[in-house]
Each structure stands twice: as C-alpha cells, then as structure tokens.
Amino acid sequence: MAAPKLEAPLDDLIAAGAKWTPVPLLEEIKDHGRAWEDLAAQYGVTNPDPPWKTSLDGMCEALAAGSCSSVAAVEKEWLEGASDRAHLPGAPALPLLERRWEEDELSATLYQDVPFPERQLLALAHSLIKRGLIDERGLAQKVQEVRERLSAT
C-alpha cells in the first residue's frame, strides 16, 4: 500500500500562505505590543512562560477537536484527498495541520520579528480572523478592555 500523498494539500497551503495579507490590528500589536520577556523582567516574574500560554495551547487543542468523529480520522481522509474536510461530520473549526502550516508560514513572513510565544498567538489570531471565527473589531474591543483593566491596577 502506498503512503498517503501529502504534497498536494501542503503545496496548496504553502501557495495560499504566500498571499497572506496583514491584519491592521495584529500589525499594531506586532509593532507596539510588549513581549512577555520584557514584561516579566519589569515585574520581577521568573516564570519563562507567560500566564496566557496555557490558555493559548488549550485554545489550539479545542479548535482542532472534532465533535462526532476522531480528529485523526478527519485529518487522514483530508490528507489522502478522500474528502473535503468542511463537509465531514465533526470537522474541526481550525484543523491542527492547517493551523500548524499557517503558523509556520506566518512565522516566516508577517511575524518573523516577533518572539515566541507571541508569534504563535498572533498567527492563531490571524488564522481565526481569516476564517471569520473572530472579527477584528471584536478582538480590538477585547484588547482595549484588557488594557484598561491592566492600567487601572
């Protein structure tokens, strides 16, 4: 039995990745946001991971989870070219492999100068905005709410 042909979906995603367009809000955060390393030093925190890293990892897991069928089975069928993932029962909102490919592409292009894990966070937000799972205006409002809470303390 031949191994699944991975080139077609990967080539398609890489080609699509070359067309990434900047998201104004994420560009603003990229250019003027503060990295955890700087904040930790400012506040004397010794934990190398930001407090939001666990939530980020959990969000990625939840987005990749299928509700009716195994995520691995959905991914395998798609990679083999046997199905269009969007029409599969239990298809995840942001499939693991697509998220990782997009993260890699965005990390090498738009967010190459941003430190990890902030780069991972921006790439995830970019993918979510691209898919219409969140909108830029709503995200901007949440960012503003967090800024106001932090500056009030």
Image (cartoon, grey):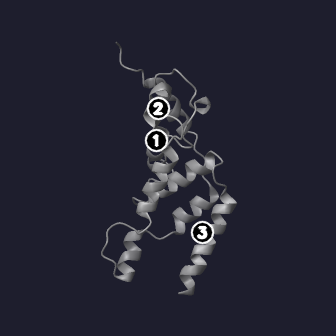
Look at the numbered discs 1 and 3 and tell me whether their residues touch, using CB distance below 8 Å.
no
Q: Identify which residue is drawn at 54% across, 43% down.
A: 94
Q: Earlier in the sequence, mark 1 or mark 3?
A: 1
Image coordinates of residue 137 in percent, x first then y, are 69, 61
Earlier along the polypeptide chain: callout 3 or callout 2?
2
Q: Kindly identify which numbered label has been placed on residue 143.
A: 3
Check residue 75 in the rendering and tell me which mark sits there, or answer none: 2
Q: Secondary structure at mark 1?
A: helix
Q: Amino acid at mark 2?
A: Glu
Residue 91 shown left or right of residue 141 in the figure = left
Label 3, secondary structure: give it. helix
> What residue is shown at x 44% (from left), y 66% (from top)?
52
**Furthest-front residue in view?**
68
Residues marked 1 and 2 touching at CB (< 8 Å):
yes
Please determine whether, in this image, residue 105 is positioned above or below residue 41: above
Identify the residue under disc 1: 96
Distance from disc 3 to disc 2, alpha carbons, whole Å, reads 33 Å
Image coords of residue 105 (percent x, y): 47, 43
Label 3 or label 2, whichever lies nearer to me, is 2
